[in-house]
Amino acid sequence: MVLEAVGTIRKSLLSGLAIPYLGPGVLALAGESCPLPASPEVLVDRLTAKASVPHKIRKQLTAAAQFIENFKHRKTVKAAMTEAFRPDVQPTALHRYLASLPALRLIVHVWYDDLPQKALAGAKGRGMVQGVSQAEHFGEWVHYFDGGTLARDEAAAAESWTPLLYQPLGSVCPAANFLVSDSDFVEVLTEIDIQTPIPEAVQNLRKGRNFLFLGCRFSTQLERIFAQQIIKRSSDRHWAVLPEEPTRNEARFLAGYNIQRIPMPLAAFSELLATGEAAPVQACAEAAA
């Protein structure tokens, strides 16, 4: 079943019917020496190392960011986030593979690094749309970037960008926009059920397509809500590469949205996508059994 699913995923990516949804775990492919935070837990440690935060929220990313914003100013949060994601790390083989797919129309990247942008740097007709904080851009939900240049009137043209890179949490590049504090997410979650913060181009491009979750966990309500709302009105079949045994909440989420779990390491899965060779998957499938 795993081998068959991976074959279907590969065909769907090549035909443009699948949409990659990249989470923070993709950074693990950059190696153990990667200086970028590869999880919310690591990121909150970076933020709280720069500012004193009450012990009870020191391990809660959004709450810690909110405390720093309240008592040290929003600029302190932005500076700490920028510093955390400033190191120059080159795209992984997975990023480069996805960027090479000519039929791929949309990539969703739910983390703050700039590796997808770097991988797409040479692509013609590419563009980005990123979530922005109401604390810094009141009344605006997203900014559009034609390449690396802010393009305020590109909402209509965004659907024609190939591919369109959608970063709902913002990104360090090109303008250091971050949704990270409690208040950032309260604003978005108030409207997300009616899809207001999600660009129309994304809503149109997802229709009838399958999502492929890579480097993602669904253990928190925030992670599940964002995934649920972004895949809304798309296909009724999706996949998630998840080598770890899912938690009860994760298992319920996967079942509720017909997301087939691929129980194999992301590195092996990525190699298979690029090469088409089944040996790594066979070994992982046997190990999972």
Image (spheres, rainbow, N blue to C red):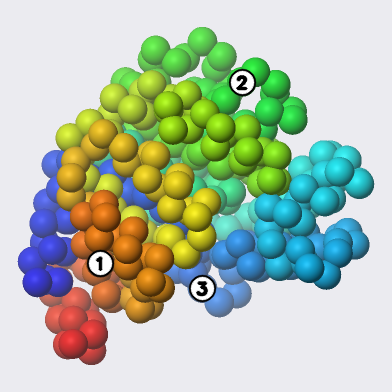
Circle on res. 261: 1
For marks 1 and 2, give the CA distance: 36 Å
Amino acid carrying label 3: it is Gly
Q: Residues within 10 Å of mark 1 (few under 14, many from 20)?
A: many
- Residue 145 appears anywhere in the view: no
Closer to us: mark 1 or mark 3?
A: 1
- Secondary structure, mark 3, is loop
Q: Which of marks 3 and 2 is nearer the N terminus?
A: 3
Residue located beneath label 2 in the image: 140
- Secondary structure, mark 2, is loop
- Secondary structure, mark 1, is strand
**Nearer to us in this view, 166 or 204:** 204
Q: Residues within 10 Å of mark 3 (few under 14, many from 20)?
A: few
Residue 173 image-quadrant placement: top right
Amino acid carrying label 1: it is Arg
Is the C terminus in the top left, top right, bottom left or bottom right quadrant? bottom left
Residue 70 image-quadrant placement: top right
Amino acid carrying label 2: it is Glu
**Nearer to us in this view, 242 or 176:** 242
Say which residue appears at 37% left-offset and 77% top-offset: 244
Q: Are marks 1 and 2 in contact (CB under 8 Å)?
A: no
Say which residue appears at 68% left-offset and 52% top-offset: 62
Circle on res. 31: 3
